[in-house]
Image: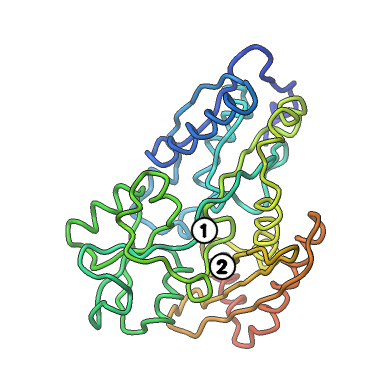
Amino acid sequence: MSERAEAPARTAGNAAVVIATRESRLALWQAEHVRGLLQTRLGLAAELLGMTTRGDQILDRALSKVGGKGLFVKELEAALEDGRAQLAVHSLKDVPMELPAGFVLGAVLEREDARDAFVSPRFERLDALPRGACVGTSSLRRAAQLLSLRPDLRIESLRGNLDTRLRKLDAGTYDAIVLAAAGLVRLGLGGRIRMCFDPGEMTPAAGQGALGLEWRADAAALGAQLAPLSHRPTWLATTAERAVSRALGGSCSMPLAAHAVWQGARLQVDAMLGHPLEPGRPVLRARRQAAVADDAAAQALGEGVAAALRAADRDGYLLAAQALRNA
């Protein structure tokens, strides 16, 4: 990060807060949602700065081959750094576990449905697909869990924004695809969902369904203004989920999932680890539950789940993922 990150931060003052966002329809919906919250809950005016990221431009290769999900946030961080924007809105599952120096994940909004959705023009459920059916996803996490449920399926790569993926499905390229339920619901496309997977059999990605707000670490005044937008139960749940991924070195080259749900005052975390090169290998699962009242407890719970997965990894899944990252 250049020294420009140390320059005095722009705060809202009487000017509109500029929100950096990707330009896909879903990303713009998310940014508009945050702009509405700024106005109705905080009395702040805001405007959008639409940007096309490297992750949006590179559609012919898997994210694990071209830099991972961080490609969806780097351009937005550049806009924060040079003062063109004061706030960036992200799908939390796309936010790397470690942010560059000078930036903070300052708030997490209340989560939408975190589950994965089965979408098909002809088939009602996963188990209704014929043998050898083609299912589209570029997520190693989804591929590993799909094959654990239906080893006979043919998994084919599927990149692009949500509308592009649906167009490819409707064109007959795939028998079915798997998408995050939250994106479909947010765009009014919930009717496309045939079924939602139980998180116990298709564990979501860490942070899936939640929106994260990022700003410069030196923007203390803006951070204080925006802090009320953060939803504490979602913040703690996703803190635990992201702790699992951080502890195991999670990336796009690792089929890793973590999902936390509240059971009263206790938080239950389920996690899954698959083999990065052989998605048909058995998936490993772990579950832990603990009373969670603060960030430290959420972090400790997630790290405990990661330790359980590491202990269960007797066949070198994590070593294979590390080798893939270093290749």
Mark 1 surroundings: few (<14), some (14-19) or many (≥20) residues within 10 A: many
- In this picture the colour scheme is rainbow
The mark found on residue 9 in the picture is none
Q: Amino acid at mark 1?
A: Ala
When asked about the image quadrant of residue 6, the answer is top right
Looking at the image, which residue sits at the far left? 171
Mark 2 surroundings: few (<14), some (14-19) or many (≥20) residues within 10 A: many
Looking at the rendered image, the disc whose residue lies closer to the viewer, 2 or 1, is: 1
Q: Going 59% across and 87% down the picture, which residue do you hit? A: 315
Q: Going 42% across and 56% down the picture, which residue do you hit? A: 181
Element at label 2: strand
Element at label 1: loop
Where is mark 2, residue-wise?
257
Indicate the position of residue 55 as horizontal and vertical percent values.
44, 46
Where is mark 1, residue-wise?
114
Give the number of marks: 2
Indicate the position of residue 160 as horizontal and vertical percent values.
35, 50
- Does label 2 or label 1 sit earlier along the sequence? 1
Indicate the position of residue 123 as horizontal and vertical percent values.
24, 70
Please state which of residues 204 and 276 is positioned toward the viewer in this rendering.
Answer: 204
Looking at the image, which residue sits at the far bottom? 314
Q: Amino acid at mark 2?
A: Ala
Is residue 172 rendered to the left or right of residue 240? left
Against 56, residue 217 (above or below) is: above
Against 248, residue 224 (above or below) is: above
When asked about the image quadrant of residue 313, the answer is bottom right
Please state which of residues 327 and 212 is positioned toward the viewer in this rendering.
Answer: 212
